[in-house]
Amino acid sequence: MDYFFGEKEYFKNIKKIKYEGPKSDNPLAFKFYDKDKIVAGKTMEEQLKFACAYWHSFCANGTDPFGGATITFPFADKDPMTEAEKKADAAFEFFTKIGTPYYCFHDADVAPSGNNMDEYAKNYIKITDMFLERQKETGIKLLWNTSNMFSEDTYMNGAASNPDFNVVQKCGFKVKTCLDANVKLGASNYVFWGGREGYMNLINTDMQREKDHIGQFFRMARDYGRSIGFKGNFLIEPKPMEPSKHQYDYDAETAIAFIKEQGLENDFKCNIEANHATLAGHTFDHDLQVCADKGMLGSVDANQGDNQNGWDTDEFPYDVYETTRAMLVILRNGGLGLGGLNFDAKRRRNSTDMQDLFISHILGMDTFALGLIMADKILKDGKLDAFVANRYSSFDSGNGKKFEQGKMDLVELAKLGQTAQTKLISGKQEYLESLVNQYLFG
Ligand code: XUL
Ligand code: CO
């Protein structure tokens, strides 16, 4: 099989990345991700369903608020459409070489927006037609696409929540175009991340009206998507802030409440991003568990934040403790369903070698592979789950069961409480944490 498409090989000197095991000193090899290895009844590839994020891997050039680009791409071209075509070829070469079975993109990542909406659609359709060909050639699938309604100045006051209906109309055009491409490419999901769907100051904002407009917009997107044959999940990706001060889909609980308030629960689930959960003051596994408990775990943006920084650093995951805890939730959930693990992650601004694009993905894939192996070990051993089950066992029978089943009123509960004997029962947190260390390093 050839590992390049179009006119040339963009990542020369880098062959398909293989599993070489934990003792390998080859930076361009997997140490733990062995795609065909069976873990918890499925291959690692099927369990983890990795996706590559177009916007970080082929667009982010190291620019930050304090300085310009540090990363140059081998597909740069003076003509924006030619560059988009070369970028698509380079992207499929990368997916094939690194071995991510899925990819994700925004409209703005893949094609130039042109001078008007017709040019935008023409460019986008041309590139997504090309994607369709490349998907057929490689077997790589689209996990989700989305519309970027936050970068252009038009969206500075919001997208579907914008106080100006003219902007909402433009959003309609963009999302319709993106849903058409989604169905053409056979995607599993369609994502809405509400970057500017929030506000900076209540002084100029009618909050409930804005939320209702988003709800109305989502119902229209759902109805259109279903009418053209989209069978996957619509996903809301919660984030508390950045770029908005108050983002409406703050965290998993907030997004689920919104989904239910707006009557979208049969079609919408959540896409949980690790760094967004930590920005909201939660842990990654907290937001995953909130979704799992409500049957709302749609997909995952797999990255990692920084313990000291209060912003979205989108690092590639390297914390095995965190991925183990995430994979515990995912395995207990019975897997990711139509979702996957999308690396919404970028290499650091000073990781400027082209090799670093590969190495960063290897790091993320190995870290989640370890998380999967460890979570499987923990679940098979069963001590953690048995401890938790036992902790709640007073509700398994007798009056506790009656309470849980709603067969008791407050008068009866109070009567029992008059003579109830309570004792201090240890939560054993440190014991359980040291048990996890034993699984990880024992
Ligand atoms: C931004 C973010 C987005 C979404 C897709 O923080 O996570 O890239 O994943 O729009
Ligand atoms: Co994301």
Image (cartoon, helix red, strand yellow):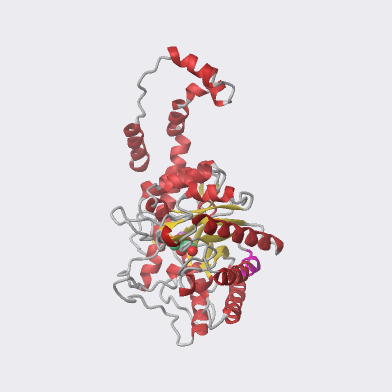
Q: Nearer the viewer, residue 439 or 112?
A: 112
At 53% across and 59% down in the image, what residue appears? 210
Tell me where residue 294 sits by quadrant: top right
Residue lying at 51% horizontally and 23% vertically, measured from the top left: 395
The part of the image, by quadrant, that contains residue 131 is: bottom right
Is residue 172 rendered magenta in the image?
A: no
- What's drawn in magenta, residue-wise? 180-186
Horizontal relation, residue 88 to residue 316: left or right: right
Q: Position of residue 132 (x, y in %)?
A: 62, 72
Q: How far across and down, in percent of the image, does residue 150 sit?
A: 47, 68
Residue 350 showing in the rendered view: yes
Residue drawn 52% across the image and 67% down it: 105
Of residues 104 and 236, the one nearer the viewer is: 236
Q: Residue furthest top?
A: 419
Judged from this view, the residue extending furthest toward the front is 203
Q: x, y percentage for residue 14?
A: 42, 72
Please tell me how many numbered marks the rendered image carries.
0
Foreground of the two, 433 or 252: 252
- Can the viewer see residue 4 in this picture? no
59 shown above or below 259: below
The prevailing secondary structure element of the residues shown in magenta is helix
Quadrant containing the N terminus is bottom right
Residue 236 lies, in percent from the top left, at 53, 56
Instruction: Relative to 50, say whether 326 is above or below.
Output: above
> Is 185 a magenta residue?
yes
Left or right: 1 as drawn, with respect to 14? right
Measured along the vertical axis of the image, is residue 300 above or below residue 398?
Answer: below
Rendered-image quadrant of the C terminus: top left
Left or right of 227 in this view: 90: left
